[in-house]
Image: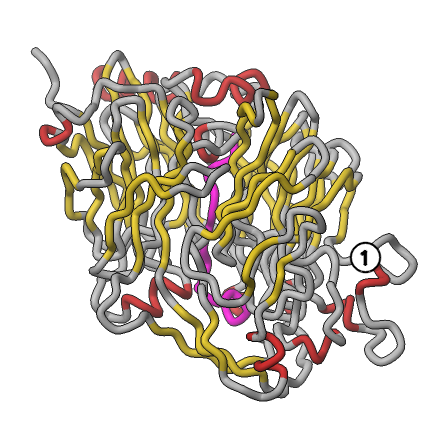
């Protein structure tokens, strides 16, 4: 009995310390904690750890694994702090002992089951378990934001941020920036109007809300129809369903916005439709929009601009520049000056048919005839359907290389009539998908972001890849496959060096951390989400789990 009590007390002592703003600013510089999504506010997905390296990765073995009691899919990566691993998905929140994998607590997510009808891929959670000052923050699919006690999992506060019946959904973890809890939302394929907002993390009180689509009379409203379709802006998309970056020196958060709604431009009079398919730089304390860049004016292709960016400081023409990299769904790899949003470069990283280039003077795409043909009623072959599928890429600042899981897939697209029905799909297209016969489904690629040079490329042939990528100083890349394999690649060639078969498909990003002098790698497995399930069908079983790996322990 004394031994059991001692273990219990030790477990609680792991949870005694609240996590601070300094921990968030430190990020991956402290390899014993993983408190930021993407290993830091910059989302580089790069770790300086190298105990696991190319020479010994074949010895990597599982240390512990646990079910996470979920059939809807795992899209988050774990949070690690002070000897505890926190895991979130659409149905549960967990705390595990970092060393043994034993569950410390778990809390079910209470939500209205009817909300699943607008959720598309189900009750999902992208990002990570957001922790700050002793609290864990998360969303639920029925549009609630909540804070849990990190020690016990008990709810501290809960607030409703939208009404799912309007077509919105809670699928993304919030982020703490300059002491403010920043909250986004999903819903760009329905009748939603996008927004981002700030909350007091102590009380759950809303501090501000900034809509991604301006109301009449506000800056940008001139890019929406007025006379013929005066209500188009109210239901125009622009959701904020993926994670944000934060630059503490500039005090700016960078958040991407979703596609315009409907896709069919007839219902928006072919207007630019700001601030959809854009990236926004926003003050976390006030919600002030400082600058924006619209990747796809008049987005008619479902080219969400929500995919997370990477922040880096690089030399360009001998000058140190603060930049932002974005491997966009539309097939171009963008480099922006993150101080002002000015375009520096944009080069294709996959096959592109909708635009011939991005004009560096205007920042706008130079369109091919594809859009005009589609507007004339033709079924067109749109490349890419997605250059990459809403996952974290990695960037090694020592090599100035980005590592991307790409897709080689076209969308066969035809514009059709659509009916407005509040809270329902509102796209105005018919589509199917295909990869050219005899070609790979995609590629693992290493790319120089400024020049667009592909340093190496390895084909993906089993299934389309929807997992994030982690780069380490051990010259390794870690990623996963929809078929369930967790794999390590040679960072210099892309050649596979190791694999471990998990119980389901992998859509999540991996992490690495150090504990008591030993390096670990962790991954969540569990197929889920609209696209992974669409393309895997019934070939991959469902069921969520977390698995932790390390080299064999030394005596």
- Where residue 524 sits, quadrant-wise, is top left
Q: Which residue occupies 67% across, 30% down?
A: 202
Q: Is residue 326 left or right of residue 503?
A: right
* Image location of residue 223, percent across then percent down: 80, 63
Q: Which residues are magenta?
A: 116-131
* Image location of residue 32, percent across then percent down: 36, 18
Of all residues shown, which one is farthest toward the right?
217
The N terminus is located in which quarter? top left
- Where residue 53 sits, quadrant-wise, is top left
Dominant secondary-structure state across the stretch colored magenta: loop
Q: Which residue occupies 30% across, 52% down?
A: 443
| Residue 126 at least partly seen | yes
Binning the other alpha carbons within 10 Å of mark 1 as few (below 14), some (14 to 19) or many (20 upward) gives many
Question: Which residue matches tag 1?
Answer: 214
Q: Which of the two residues, 511 or 356, is positioned nearer the viewer here?
A: 356
Q: Which residue occupies 45% across, 76% down?
A: 381
Q: Which of the two residues, 86 or 357, is positioned nearer the viewer here?
A: 357
Secondary structure of residue under mark 1:
loop
* Image location of residue 348, percent across then percent down: 47, 52
Please check the rendered image and state whether residue 170 is part of the magenta-colored stretch, yes or no.
no
- Where residue 259 sits, quadrant-wise, is bottom right
Q: Which residue occupies 25% across, 52% down?
A: 481
Please check the rendered image and state whether residue 122 is part of the magenta-colored stretch, yes or no.
yes
Q: Is residue 64 above or below residue 75?
A: above
The C terminus is located in which quarter? top left
* Image location of residue 386, percent across then percent down: 45, 61
């Amino acid at each position: 009995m004394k031994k059991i009590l001692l273990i219990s007390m030790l477990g609680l002592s792991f949870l005694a310390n609240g996590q601070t703003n300094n921990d968030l600013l430190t990020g991956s510089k402290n390899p014993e904690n993983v408190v930021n999504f993407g290993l830091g506010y910059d989302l580089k997905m790069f770790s300086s750890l190298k105990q696991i390296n190319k020479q010994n990765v074949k010895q990597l073995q599982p240390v512990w694994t646990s079910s996470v009691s979920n059939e809807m899919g795992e899209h988050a990566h774990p949070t690690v702090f002070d000897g505890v691993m926190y895991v979130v998905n659409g149905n549960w929140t967990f705390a595990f002992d970092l060393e043994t994998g034993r569950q410390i607590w778990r809390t079910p997510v209470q939500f209205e089951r009817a909300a699943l009808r607008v959720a598309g891929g189900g009750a999902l959670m992208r990002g990570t378990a957001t922790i700050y000052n002793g609290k864990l923050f998360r969303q639920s699919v029925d549009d609630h934001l909540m804070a849990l006690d990190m020690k016990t999992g008990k709810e501290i506060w809960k607030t409703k941020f939208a009404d799912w019946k309007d077509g919105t959904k809670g699928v993304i973890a919030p982020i703490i920036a300059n002491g403010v809890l920043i909250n986004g939302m999903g819903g760009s394929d329905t009748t939603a109007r996008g927004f981002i907002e700030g909350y007091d993390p102590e009380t759950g009180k809303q501090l501000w809300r900034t809509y991604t689509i301006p109301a009449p009379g506000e800056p940008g409203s001139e890019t929406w129809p007025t006379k013929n379709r005066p209500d188009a802006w109210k239901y125009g998309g622009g959701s904020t369903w993926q994670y944000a970056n934060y630059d503490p020196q500039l005090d700016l958060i960078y958040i991407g916005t979703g596609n315009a709604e409907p896709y069919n431009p007839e219902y928006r009079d072919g207007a630019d439709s700001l601030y959809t398919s854009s990236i926004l730089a926003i003050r976390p304390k006030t919600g002030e929009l400082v600058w924006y860049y619209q990747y796809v004016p008049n987005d008619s292709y479902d080219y969400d601009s929500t995919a997370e960016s990477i922040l880096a400081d690089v030399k360009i023409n001998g000058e140190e520049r603060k930049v932002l990299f974005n491997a966009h769904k539309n097939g171009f790899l963008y480099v922006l000056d993150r101080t002002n949003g000015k375009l520096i470069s944009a080069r294709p990283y996959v096959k592109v048919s909708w635009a011939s280039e991005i004009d560096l003077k205007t920042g706008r795409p130079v369109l091919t005839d594809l859009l005009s043909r589609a507007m004339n009623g033709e079924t067109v072959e749109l490349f890419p359907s997605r250059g990459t599928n809403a996952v974290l890429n990695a960037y090694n600042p020592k090599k100035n290389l980005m590592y991307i899981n790409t897709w080689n897939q076209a969308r066969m697209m035809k514009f059709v009539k659509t009916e407005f029905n509040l809270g329902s799909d509102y796209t105005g297209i018919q589509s199917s998908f295909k990869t050219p016969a005899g070609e790979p489904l995609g590629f693992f690629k290493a790319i120089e972001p400024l020049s667009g040079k592909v340093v190496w490329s390895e084909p993906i042939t089993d299934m389309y890849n929807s997992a994030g990528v982690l780069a380490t100083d051990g010259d390794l890349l870690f990623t996963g496959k929809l078929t369930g394999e967790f794999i390590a690649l040679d960072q210099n060639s892309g050649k596979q060096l190791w694999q471990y078969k998990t119980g389901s498909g992998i859509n999540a990003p991996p992490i690495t951390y150090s504990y008591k002098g030993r390096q670990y790698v962790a991954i969540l497995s569990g197929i889920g989400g609209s696209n992974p399930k669409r393309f895997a069908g019934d070939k991959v079983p469902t069921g969520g789990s977390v698995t932790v790996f390390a080299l064999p322990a030394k005596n």
